[in-house]
Amino acid sequence: MKYGIVIFPSKKLQDLANSYRKRYDPHYALIPPHLTLKAAFETDMDVNSITEKMEAIAKTHEPFTLRIRKVSSFQPTNNTIHLKAEKTQQLEELHEDLYASLPGDKPEYPFVPHITIGQKLSNDEHSDVYGQLRMLGVEHEEVIDRFHLVYQLENGSWTVYETFRLGKDPQ
């Protein structure tokens, strides 16, 4: 089965991202706007073993503030346009712990926390769209207190398997 680990931001930020994704992201219908912590991976490992490891990781990380300040692009690597998240120590450590503890290959690219709003654009389309969107004044902050194990369905869409709350359980 194919799994991934993501953060779903608030409805407010999802609505902003979707206002562009519905036009510029062919994956719009497959998964809500998200920040990928661990890219899609396939494993034969028992899902209970995965969730136990994720539960342990969640307990060692505290909630943190997600800050979005601008629209950016991965060009020339690819024509993906995204809402760029500030790369905080908490976010980077969570990403690293998930990669170190769970199955799957090392990341293909360095970790750049982001929420995709456009992808698979032609060079001309990317240039036009990015030229317009980078002028947006994006100022968004929210506290992230959970992340999600998602899995891919046969139709290519993704759904949540389990949600993990950051921080130690209140006693």
Image (cartoon, rainbow, N blue to C red):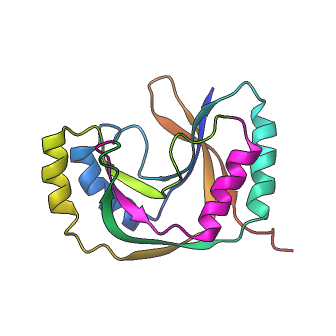
Residue 151 forms part of the magenta stretch: no
Residue 160, quarter of the rendered image = top right
- Quadrant where the N terminus sits is top right
How many numbered badges does the structure rendering display?
0
Q: Residue at x 63, y 55 (%)?
A: 95
The residue lying toward the viewer, choosing from 86 and 65, is: 86
Residue 12, quarter of the rendered image = bottom left
Residue 102 forms part of the magenta stretch: yes
Residue extending farthest to the front is 76
Residue 25, percent across and down? 29, 43
Q: Residue at x 81, y 46 (%)?
A: 52
- Quadrant where the C terminus sits is bottom right
- Left or right: 86, with 118 as reference point: right
Residue 167, quarter of the rendered image = bottom right
Residue 2, percent across and down? 59, 30
- Left or right: 92, with 14 as reference point: right
Q: Residue at x 29, y 37 (%)?
A: 26
Residue 91, percent across and down? 60, 64
The residue lying toward the viewer, choosing from 45 and 79, is: 79
Q: Residue at x 73, y 66 (%)?
A: 61
Residue 40, above or below 65: above
Look at the image and give the residue range highlighted in magenta. 78-103
- Left or right: 61, with 56 as reference point: left
Residue 9, percent across and down? 48, 62
